[in-house]
Image (spheres, rainbow, N blue to C red):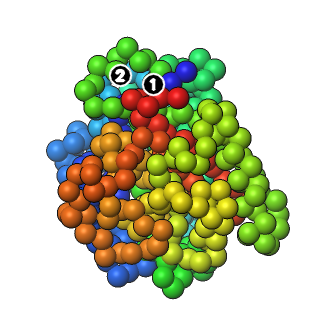
Amino acid sequence: MPIYLCGAAQISAQQPLTDAWLTAPEALPESTLVRAIDPPFRSLLPAAESRRMGVALKRMAVVADSAMAEAGLGETDAIVVGTGMGCVESTEHFLDALCRQGERLLGPTHFMQSTHNTPASLLARRLHCHGYNATFSHQQVSFDQALYDAFLLMQTARAATVLCGGIEEVTPTFHILLRRMGYVGHAAQVACSEAAAAFVLTTQADKVMQAAAPRAILADMCMGHLPPTGDTAAKAPVVGHALDAMLGRHGLTAADIDAVIVPNNGYAAYDALPGSLLAQHLPHVPQVAYKRLFGECFCASALGLYMAQRLIERGHIPTALVSGGMDHNMDCSKDHGQNSAVAARRLLLVNHSMATDFSLILLTSSSHAL
């Protein structure tokens, strides 16, 4: 059954709660860490509630409120959230107090807010949702796992509406650890950043199709584990087989895909897998590298989905966004309409976690439903 993305919101390195990045994107500073641009929380959250929240929880609450308001459905049957490391700032506060106070007289607030499932729990309390609630934490495919769980819940009719979110917080201290791990900080790699995004997915077509603009449909999705081999190029056929099977289920070919939203971040070792996949299976399909706009983090794929959803509703992709490379000097203001841009009717999102796990997400426009 069609699964509609009828509400979405983001807080990232771009202007929050807006789609200004489509025409006037913020240029990422020449830094290895770029924090998210926060909206005015004081005007968006009750003061008494906001004081008890860390930054990550505030972001998750705001994007969820915005996505639910845009969807206009009133309630959700389930809440699923993906996060690589949870509320890092609260974790640091808790561990710092643990060291300073000799493991005595510790307040419970930072501990309760430092767990990975805190954002999903917060949303359930604020939205009075007593249904299914889950959190997935699997590094770079954390959000993908959450979305896949929501996809299965709706395909098996266990939920008609699901709020799906992705949240990642990167503090300066955590950024140091990520650089030591070799995850960020490589030459030509995009900056490490933060992400908070929320999506409302529903099968209630009668309510969704009242909108004048076309809606994005989550047509299909698959995930898989890659063989433990050091040869990245040898893994591409495994992902390619899954891609061919997914397209075949809907009677599609590579020629039917308008563009691929790729996870390229400028680090050659990381970009090798999607590069090999697209060269072998989608050689002539335009690519959009969303991380040059939003940066890199464990839940960056949530922002990739946000971009795809907005582009489908827009109906076309600005020419400045279409690039297989990592051009940071984009000028999207030169987009002059559909005649000068790539169509956005069927988009494919590709993601992987250090060439060990991968996901493929197929989005279509409601006007071109499969």
Location of residue 323 (image quadrant): bottom left
* SS label for mark 1: strand
Q: Are marks 1 and 2 in contact (CB under 8 Å)?
A: yes
Per the image, the residue denoted by label 1 is 202
Amino acid type for the residue under numbered disc 1 = Thr
Spatial separation of the CA atoms under disc 1 and disc 2: 8 Å
Compared with 28, 194 (above or below) is above
Compared with 112, 322 (above or below) is below
As rendered, which of 36 and 347 lies closer to the eye?
Answer: 347
Q: Is residue 186 left or right of residue 330?
A: right
Q: Which mark is residue 208?
A: 2
Between label 1 and label 2, give the one nearer the viewer.
Answer: 2
Instruction: State the residue at coordinates (46%, 49%).
Output: 258
Q: Which mark is residue 216?
A: none
Instruction: State the residue at coordinates (79%, 72%).
Output: 230
As rendered, which of 93 and 160 lies closer to the eye?
Answer: 160
* SS label for mark 2: helix
Amino acid type for the residue under numbered disc 2 = Val
Instruction: Check the picture and name the quadrant holding the N terminus.
Output: top right
- Report if residue 269 is visible in the image: yes
